[in-house]
Image (tube, rainbow, N blue to C red):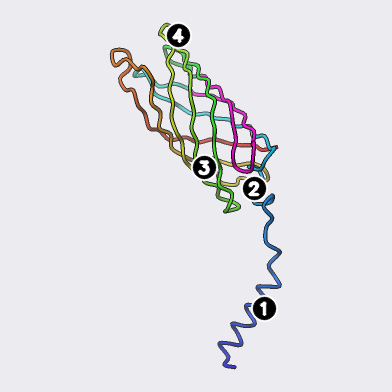
Amino acid sequence: MTMNKLTALAFAAVAAFASGPPATAAEVAGAFSKGRTNLVATAGTGYGFNETYLVLGLGVSYYLIDGLNVGLSVESWTGSDPTLYKVTPSVQYVFQQIPRLNPYIGAFYRRTYIDGLPDINSAGGRAGVYLSAGRNAYVGLGAVYESYLDCKKTIYSSCNETYPEVSFVISF
């Protein structure tokens, strides 16, 4: 056996003994496994009606099966006029194949309550990734596409939007 082959064989043996057993499905799914509940907090700024708003939100989701959740969130858009409140039921799938990096896709329906104007409904989708931020804590980075239903161009400057989203998730 040559020195390179012997070194490679020794390295492989050490690596095999040093590594632990493969992760179980439950360990990989972790915060996104069946029966888990996630709390989501959002904070940032939003733009609408030619105004900049402070956006604060809270949400909860429950995993029906590994990776698949249903959720409900609320947002408050304040600091400008008119004030907005949004209620959003959603469904989302989180891919658990990579332990610290979890891509997600989802869909939602939203009801927006607008002070002084008719309420408006929208539907959309989102995609992004959750990054591990500690035990049962994740930071979500993604993009959202939202289409307003029965949108009147005389009231709203745009009936479709694409925007980034950042979230902080705690699972229990």
Q: Mark 3 or mark 4: name the one nearer the start of the chain.
A: 3
Q: Amino acid at mark 3?
A: Tyr
Instruction: Determine which residue is flagged by label 4.
Output: 115
Comparing marks 3 and 4, which lies closer to the viewer? Answer: 3
Q: Secondary structure at mark 1?
A: helix
Residue sitting farthest toward the front: 65
Cα separation, mark 4 vs mark 2, equals 41 Å
Q: Mark 2 or mark 3: name the one nearer the start of the chain.
A: 2
Q: Position of residue 54 (x, y in %)?
A: 48, 22
Q: Mark 4 or mark 2: name the one nearer the start of the chain.
A: 2
Cα separation, mark 1 vs mark 2, equals 29 Å
Q: Position of residue 36 (x, y in %)?
A: 68, 37
Judge whether 91 appears above or below 79 on screen.
below
Instruction: Determine which residue is flagged by label 1.
Output: 13
Q: Position of residue 46 (x, y in %)?
A: 43, 25
Type of secondary structure dominating the magenta stretch: strand
Q: Nearer the viewer, residue 6 or 56?
A: 6
Query: Contact (CB < 8 A) between labels 1 and 3?
Result: no
Q: Amino acid at mark 4?
A: Asp
Q: Secondary structure at mark 3?
A: strand
Q: Amino acid at mark 1?
A: Ala
Q: Residue at x 31, y 22 (%)?
A: 158
Q: Amino acid at mark 2?
A: Ala
Left or right of 80 on screen, residue 75? right
Left or right of 123 on screen, residue 2? right
- Whether residue 161 appears in magenta in the rendering, the answer is no
Query: Contact (CB < 8 A) between labels 1 and 2?
Result: no
Instruction: Determine which residue is flagged by label 3.
Output: 104
Q: Nearer the viewer, residue 36 or 17?
A: 36
Comparing marks 4 and 1, which lies closer to the viewer? Answer: 1
Instruction: Determine which residue is flagged by label 2.
Output: 29
